[in-house]
Image (spheres, grey):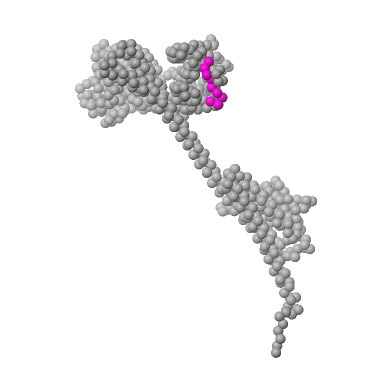
Amino acid sequence: MQQYSSLPDQNSQIDATPKLLTTIQQLRAKLWLESSLNQLQSRLNHYLLSACNNVLQAGAAESEVLQAVVNEINSVMSSTNLALTDYAVGIAMFQPQETVATVSYVSRSPSQNSQPLFVDVLTAEKKLLLRLQEVIELKDLQQLENQQPPSAWRLADDSGSVMGWLIIAAAPLSSDRESLIESKAQLRSQLMSRSANYCTTALVQLRHILSWQQQYQQLSNSNQELERTNQLKNQFLANTSHEIRTPLSSIIGFTNLLLAPGYEPTIERQREYLNIIQSSGKHLLALINDILDLSKIEANQLEVQWECVDVPLLCSNVLALVKEKAANKDLRLCLEIDPDITTLVADSLRLKQMLLNLLFNALKFTSKGSVGLQVVAKGISVHFTVWDTGSGISQEDQTQLFEPYFQIAKAVAGGAEGTGLGLAVTRKLAQIHGGSVKVESEVDSGSRFTLVLPLQQEAGAGIDKRDEGDEEAKYSSSLLPFIPSSSVDVLLVENDLPNADLMQIYLRKLGYQVTWVKNAAEMWEALTQLDPAVILMDVYLPDGNGLNLVRQLREHEQYQTIPVIVQTAMAMKGDRETCLTAGVNDYISKPIDLPLLASLVAKYSKPPI
C-alpha cells in the first residue's frame, strides 16, 4: 500500500520559499503605494473642502495643494525601507507661451546634511539643480518626461493646457539597502504618475470652485447693490411723496377754501391765499427740476452754458431771493465779496442754483443768529463760502451729506423741507465746473459750506452766450414788450382744458383774439376759416402728434410762414432741439410761465417793420 506524506519534500520547500518572499515583498510594495496615494488623496480632499467652505481660502488652496503633493511624496519615499536614497521633489510652474518654467515648490531632503539634489537629463553629463526659483527650460522638462525611467510628469488640465511639471531627483541607488532593486524605479514612476494625476485633478477642481465662488460673489454683490438701490428708491419715494403732498395740501386746501360756498374773503385774504398757492406750486416745480437735474447729470446729459458772470451782481440777486425767508426767521443776512473779484467764467444759472441750494440749507438749520455768503479769491480759484450759526452737522452725517436722497435725521424729525437732492446736485454741478464742495461743521457750532470754482475754464470749454433760443432766461420776469394795437388772431391747439383756459384768459386780457381747438381735426377745420398770426401747438393730442402736425403744416404753401410755438411738458435734454427740427419757431415748457408766453406771442405776431 502506497504511503503519502502531508509534508513537502525538502526540494519542494526550498523552491517555494523565494517565490513566497517575492510575493510578500510585492504585496508590501503595492500596499505602500496604495497607502501613500490614499494619504495624498485624503490631504488633497481636505484642501478642496476648505476651499469650498471659505471663499477667502480658494486662492491660497492652490499653493497648499502643490506644496502638499511635494511634501507627501517626499515623506512616503523617505520614511520606508522601500526608499534607498535621498529624494527631493519639486514642482516647476509653467506659463503659457513661455519656454521656461520656474521651480516654485520643493521638498526638503530627508537628511539634514544633504546637499540640493540634481536631476539627470538623459545622461549624467547634463544635470538640473532642483532648487527654489531655479529656471528650467521647457525642452529639458520634455526630455525628463520622455526618458526611462521618467523624472518629470506634466500637470495638464482637460483642455491639454500645461499648468506645471512634477519633478523628482534622487541620489545614486545603494543596492545593499533594498531587495527589490528592479521594481524600485517602477514603483517610483507609478507613485509620481498617479500623484501627478491627483494633483492635476485637484487643481482643476480648485479652479472650478474659485470660478463658482467668483460668480457667487459677483451675484452677491449685485444683489447687495440691488438691495441698496431698492432702499434708496424707497427712501426717495417716501421723501418725494412727503414733499409733493405738503405743497399739494396747501394748493388744494386754499383752492377749496376760495371755492367754498358762502365764503367771501377780503381782497387782501385772497391775495394771501393765492400767494401761498403760487409758492406751493413753485416748490413742486423746484422738486421736479432737482430730480431732472440729477438724472441729467448722472446720464451725462446736462448742458452747461459758459459765460462771463458778474459775480457781485449775481450774489446780490441770490441774497435777494432768500431775503424773505431769512426775515421770516428773524435771521440776519451777510454778504462779503473780495473787491478784486469782478467776473467769473461759469454757467450763471447753475452757479445761482448751487448758491441757492447752500443758502436755503443754511436757513433751514439756523433758528437764530446769522447766515452769510463770503466770496474770496485764492490762487486761480474763487471760494464761495456759505456760513451759518445753526445747529451744525455731526461727523457721521457729514460722511453721507452729499449722497442722493440723504437727509439728516433731526431735520426729518423736525419737519424740515427737502428731498436730500440739493447737495448731491450742487456737488455734481461743481464737479462739472471743474470745482468742488467741502464742508466744515461741528454740532451746535454752525456750518461752513465752501464752493470752489476755477476763475477761468479750460480753453476747450470756450465762452458762449446763453442760447438765444433760451427765451425763459430772457423774458421770464420781464414785462410784455409789445401789446397789439388791434386784434391779433392766435390759434391755440391744446387738449387740456385748464391749460387752455389759463392761456386764453391771459392772452385775451392782453388784447389777442384766441381760438381754441382740442385736436388735430379741429385745427385743420379752423385753418379753413382763420388766418392766425401765431399757432400755439401742444405736442400730445388725442388724435395725433403736434410735431407731426407742424411737419404737415410746412408741406402746405399757405401755412409755411405761420409762426408755430410749441407748449409742452417735454422738458428733457434734446426735447427743444427735437421740436425745432420739426419746424417750430420756438418752444416753451410746462408749467406755462405766463410772462414768457406773452413775450413769445408778441415776438412772433408783431408785424414786420
Residue at left offset 45%, top offset 19%: 353
Residue that appears at 26% across and 31% down: 543
Which quadrant of the figure has residue 150? bottom right
Q: Which residues are magenta?
A: 389-397
Q: Looking at the picture, does residue 136 appear above or below residue 593?
A: below
476 part of magenta stretch = no
The location of residue 202, given as percent across then percent down, is 60, 52
- Residue depicted at 75% across the width and 57% down the height: 85
Find residue 401 and report its horizontal and vertical position in percent. 51, 25
* Tally of marks: 0
Q: Is residue 23 left or right of residue 487?
A: right
Nearer the observer, 40 or 495 = 40
Residue at 52% x, 39% y is: 221
Along the line of sight, which residue is nearer the eye, 538 or 250? 250
Quick check: can you spot residue 560?
no
Q: Quadrant of the N terminus?
A: bottom right
